[in-house]
Amino acid sequence: MAKQQANWSPYDNNGGSCVAIAGADYCVIAADTRMSTGYNILTREYSKICKLADKCVMASSGFQADVKALQKQLAARHLIYQHQHNKQMSCPAMAQLLSNTLYYKRFFPYYSFNVLGGLDNEGKGCVFTYDAVGSYEKVGYSSQGSGSTLITPFLDNQLKSPSPLLLPVQDAVTPLVEAEAIDLVKTVFASASERDIYTGDKIEIVVVNATGIRREYMELRKD
Amino acid sequence: MFRNQYDTDVTTWSPAGRLFQVEYAMEAVKQGSAAIGLRSKTHIVLGCVNKANSELSSHQKKIFKVDDHIGVAIAGLTADGRVLSRYMRNECINYSFTYESPLPVGRLVVQLADKAQVCTQRSWKRPYGVGLLVAGLDESGAHLYYNCPSGNYFEYQAFAIGSRSQAAKTYLERRFESFTDASRDDLVKDALMAIRETLQGETLKSSVCTIAVVGVGEPFHILDQATVQQMIDAFEIVGEQEGPAAAGQEASAEPEPEQGGAAAGEGVAPMDI
């Protein structure tokens, strides 16, 4: 008897791309707002970005039901942290919490591909990139989702720093200023939406800096 | 209080139908430093007296934020209070997670009361030695509840618990009719005046008291010392004048519980205050 294959999957992929870039005193996190299933669009105005703490923002692509559940979990854990420590979680602390939360479901994972962005304890920009089960790394920039294969090579070309294994240790954050980084993000999404069918409609761009959190939008191709 | 053969554990009734261990737990509340609460239609103010053990130590935290819309002030065994606050915080977080809306205050106090009741009916447990003033805002308006170690809870317009709380209660009884429509600032002022009553002549300064507010459009938060001091200075309280009058009232209030307990079967059990 041939091995039985599952005729139902608990997962779906709602598509979309996310990008985050860390600067010296800011962090840019962006994601498109298209939510799709198969070859259909479910909505053109879905936010994949979630503010987890004062200086910590997460963008996730993948299965949005799992993403929503993950966001709720992290928000609840953050409340507990605030009750116990009387302060907000820092971005590196949230990064570890996200990793642990993802690995907790190692054997029925959150189908969620995350980038976490924000300011660390010294006010410098930081970006953390994850796989679905919690393996994470602090990087200067990152991209996840359906357009990541198109976006990452371009970011590498513009931003790639020498390997962190080389000495002397070089900063992972980009020397670009905030406006240049935002421009780069817009360019990158415009290119990705040309070739990736799941990326398009609008970009939501969130900028975290010392003054707080700012949001802006840019229109993309609707096809 | 009094020692007798029916007060060894919480699961023993006295012939008069009382659970002495529970009543002793309520004594613990009366020994703790004072906490007061009062509410208007839109705001609730909690206040408490902070007495540090010595000049070297910091004072105990007696007001806890439970959620954006609920806060609690405690009197009695503060350790028990801390544990119950943690329970309340958890309940609020879990409710929010499931229903995406804030836990109604009335539900929370019932859960708290049921939790306290369990400890009055298990031989291996003891009652919580802490009284809680729960202040919360929900769809049905502003609420102030008092949760007892006995597992009872009551809703109040204004209340005071802890040592010398009778003085504050007298003040609140005089003034409570004006609370419903009072402004937020007037409410805080009344809270400070009530706390002053419990201080028995000591000067009211922001270092001896803590004030917290929750209201419509205002999540629960503890006012910082500078703000409280400003409000105290703003209406210039002079502590000494009130001292003798309050002391006289307090002396007459104390003997009552003694009489009620000593005579078997006489008087209402203290739980029904």
Image (cartoon, coloured by chain):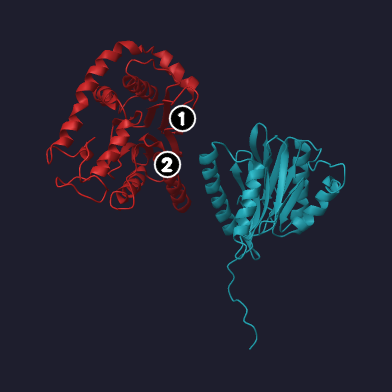
**A142 or A119: nearer the eye?**
A119
Residue B260 at x, y percent in the picture:
16, 34
- Place residue A118 in its image quadrant: top right
Label 2 Cα crowd, 10 Å radius (few <14 / some 14-19 / many 20+) = many
B129 shown above or below A37: above
Circle on res. B85: 2
**A94 or B239: nearer the eye?**
B239
B133 shown above or below B19: above
The reply, left or right, for residue A141 in relation to residue B111 is right
Q: Chain of mark 1?
A: B
Q: SS at mark 2?
A: helix
Q: SS at mark 1?
A: strand
The reply, left or right, for residue A6 in relation to residue B21 is right
Residue type of the residue flagged with mark 2: Ser
Q: Nearer the viewer, mark 1 or mark 2?
A: 2
Q: Colour of chain A?
A: cyan
Residue B144 at x, y percent in the picture:
33, 36
Q: Chain of mark 2?
A: B
